[in-house]
Image: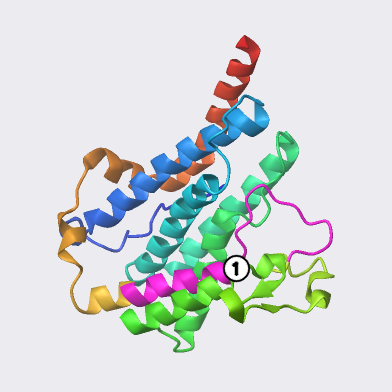
Amino acid sequence: MMATLRTDDTTSASRSTRVHGFDVLRGFSVVSMVLFHFCYDIRYIAGLPLPWFQPPLQDIWRCSISWTFVFIAGCMFAWSRDNLRRAGKYLLVAALVFIVTTIAAVDVPINFGIIYCMGSCTLISWALDRIGFKPQGVIAALVLFCGFICLLDLAQGTIGFGPFTVAVPRALYQTPYLSWLGLPGPGFASGDYYPTLPYLLLYLAGTAMGRSWRATQIPQVLKDLTCEPLEWIGQHALPIYVLHQPVLLAITMGIVALT
């Protein structure tokens, strides 16, 4: 699973104007991600009993991490110096993660995972920004978030919410070329699947709030929220994401060897 993460999400902000609360929240989510992945490795790779690590708690925990990453990354769009470069960095890391997880073959390779999601959402948001589509404000963010909720089951073949759910034409899932978008084709599998839709809408909800806060005033709670260890982790989220799973797998294999 997951996460984003961040390397230069706020590089354009000076130290005096840095919003420490974003780093704290991102850092907390990184810690949560590492713990989630450790539990996953213990149960599904090592095969050790962990009966509480299952739905619905597992799903709620996963969403609390990934949704936070995507939304904050969207917020940071307004502060980034070069979103095109930022998108390219994410997509390069995503490609490397796919190659490494395919070669390692420890679990299902990560194909269109959370880092890919960050890259594609940043790239598309950059393109939309260039043609003048710049959502801003609470209303825009709420509309985009509602759209995100309605598309949550797109990969399973439906869109909508509650009694207003409709099926997506099955023909759209018969091609292998739309898995990146959110329409997984025949035989598609991924150990960490975060396609462009629905997550682009969550990312854009973040950009709408980020633009609004930058144009007006950042909430005081985000200004006042500080925790140096979590801030450091939040500022180094991308390398931690890349490195943490090999470390966890080594620990897991050590546990297996001792049991």
- Relative depth, front residue between 183 and 234: 183
Magenta stretch encompasses residue 194: yes
**Lateral position of residue 5 relative to residue 121, left or right:** left
What residue sits 54% from the left and 49% below the top?
A: 56
Front residue (pair 37, 101): 37
Looking at the image, the residue that sits furthest to the bottom is 132
Q: Quadrant of residue 249?
A: top right
Residue 4 shows in the view: no
The picture places residue 95, in percent across and down from the top left corner, at 64, 52
Q: Quadrant of residue 8?
A: bottom left
Q: Residues within 10 Å of mark 1 (few under 14, many from 20)?
A: many
Would you place residue 150 above or below residue 35 in this image? below
Q: Is residue 222 above or below residue 126?
A: above
Question: Label 1 belongs to which residue?
Answer: 196
Q: Which residues are magenta?
A: 184-209
**Compared with residue 219, is residue 136 higher up or lower down, i.e. above or below?**
below
Q: Amino acid at mark 1?
A: Thr
What's the image's color scheme?
rainbow
Disc 1 secondary structure class: helix
What residue appears at the point 46 percent right and 78 percent down from the top-left corner?
144
- Given residues 241 and 183, the one toward you in this image is 183
Residue at (66% x, 30% y) in the render: 45
Q: Quadrant of the C terminus?
A: top right
Q: Going by the image, does 210 lie left or right of 64?
A: left
